[in-house]
Image (spheres, rainbow, N blue to C red):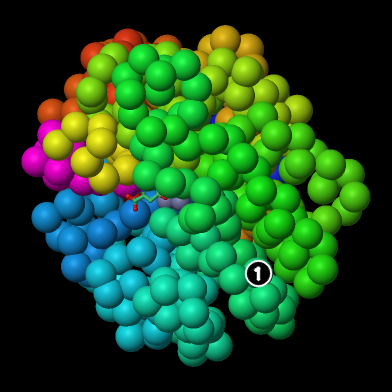
Amino acid sequence: MLLLIQNGTVINPGDQTESKADVLVEDGKIKKIAPKQKVKADRVIDAEGCYVMPGFIDMHVHLRDPGQEDKETVETASRAAVHGGFTTIVAMPNTKPAVDNSDVVYYVRNKAKDVGLVHVLQTGAVTKGQRGEELSDIESMVEAGIPAISEDGKTVMNAQLYREAMALAVKYDIPVLAHCEDATMVQGGVVNADQTMEKTKFAGISNSVEDVIVARDIMLAKDTGAALHLCHCSTKDSVRMVELAKQEGIRVTAEVCPHHFILTSEDIPGDDANYKMNPPLRTKADVEALKKGLKADVIDVIATDHAPHTAIEKGLGIKKAPFGIVGLETAAALTMTELVDKGYLTIMQMAEKMSYNPAKILDLDKGVVEEGKPADLVVFDPKKQYVIDPAEFYSKGKNTPFAGKKVKGMVMATVMDGRVVYER
Ligand code: DOR
Ligand code: ZN
Ligand code: ZN
């Protein structure tokens, strides 16, 4: 089966080129990239006015499967992913039960294969049951194919135990994806600790809750030589510490989520749990630092922390509702609208942060648009404008603070392993 993607502008972060060309795909691979190809293809996608980019790779997704299928399933998350232009998603281990052994890794992998829309890479929990007491069977999960370990949802508070986990990550040559939050310092906080909190009377989460663990984990990475990837950074000091660590040659990379580079705590309209996530929305100074960090390539990755919850749970209000918002179906448009269109990032940097760098960090043969490489591609129209409407999401989760926001940038088609898995 021959697929021809015609007339688009090919963005290839692999060699930093942007060129008008047709992309011919055969047997799951990119066969030829050249202008005006004359071939009889079985299927043609007209990408006039669009970018043809490497399929997006989301390093941070909550599938909720197994155990919380009322929130999301492997299938609904896969549909949401391809609608958002993602061809690979990395699943966090805080399911029920937690992904702390190879059986659960295989369960998710088999389900994802049956759905067959998107590459799903399941991470393994650092500790058994994510209880922070005893390391999980990391070796058997590595054999089952986990691309990384992570305790996402919480931090491993025992530094010595985490150091042992990092040593294993070095042994098996996989990165550690770190959710940085000092559990003892949260104290029931639900929003950022600033004036908003005084206004709304909600308990606050200070920047230091994140910062002390970012500092600790960077030191542990320095100690062990582990490749540390900091999840959903939200504070200005996180950016400073990542910059410093990189200057020192410590193996650290970092991600930021769209909600953290767009919204501040001042945007919380009242008791609306669609603005409740962990880490919380911070201040203008933090948002500016995150955007500068992205622009200067201190921050390597844009990830979503896609965290679906039911409408009933999110209707409980900020104090009682669970933390988290969905992100798979809004990330590309939000990045285009808020970063590329406003001059913070080039389109090449967007491709780096949403495909190329995640592939590098996870050691995947992806993230480029090159002949002979896997045909994981997204056709993205940077000019199409629309209003975000959660009713159009494929995800079961409709919990987003971006409903009604006018954005620019629409996913027109998603190709995974040479198959058109989404087309508008
Ligand atoms: O907002 C969040 N939601 N942050 C997390 O760390 C966990 C996630 C979830 O699982 O809902
Ligand atoms: Zn997290
Ligand atoms: Zn998360």
Please state which of residues 36 and 285 is positioned toward the viewer in this rendering: 285
Q: Is residue 314 magenta?
A: yes
Q: Is residue 379 visible?
A: no
Horizontally, residue 163 falls left or right of residue 398, namely right
Q: Position of residue 186 (x, y in %)?
A: 46, 46
State whether label 1 is within 8 Å of ligand 2: no
Q: Position of residue 350 (x, y in %)?
A: 58, 31
Horizontally, residue 87 falls left or right of residue 65, namely right
Please state which of residues 335 and 168 is positioned toward the viewer in this rendering: 168
Q: Is residue 189 visible?
A: yes
The kind of residue tagged 1 is Ala
Please state which of residues 408 and 225 is positioned toward the viewer in this rendering: 225
The quarter of the rendered structure image containing the N terminus is: bottom left
Quarter of the image for residue 98 reads: bottom left
- Give the answer, above or below, for where 163 lies relative to 299: below
Q: Residue at x 50, y 83 (%)?
A: 134
- Give the answer, above or below, for where 371 lies relative to 302: below
Q: Position of residue 181 (x, y in %)?
A: 53, 51
- Give the answer, above or below, for where 39 lies relative to 222: above
Assign the magenta stretch its main secondary structure: loop
The residue indicated by pointer 1 is: 159
The quarter of the rendered structure image containing the C terminus is: top left
Q: Residue at x 29, y 14 (%)?
A: 269
Stretch of the chain drawn in magenta = 305-315
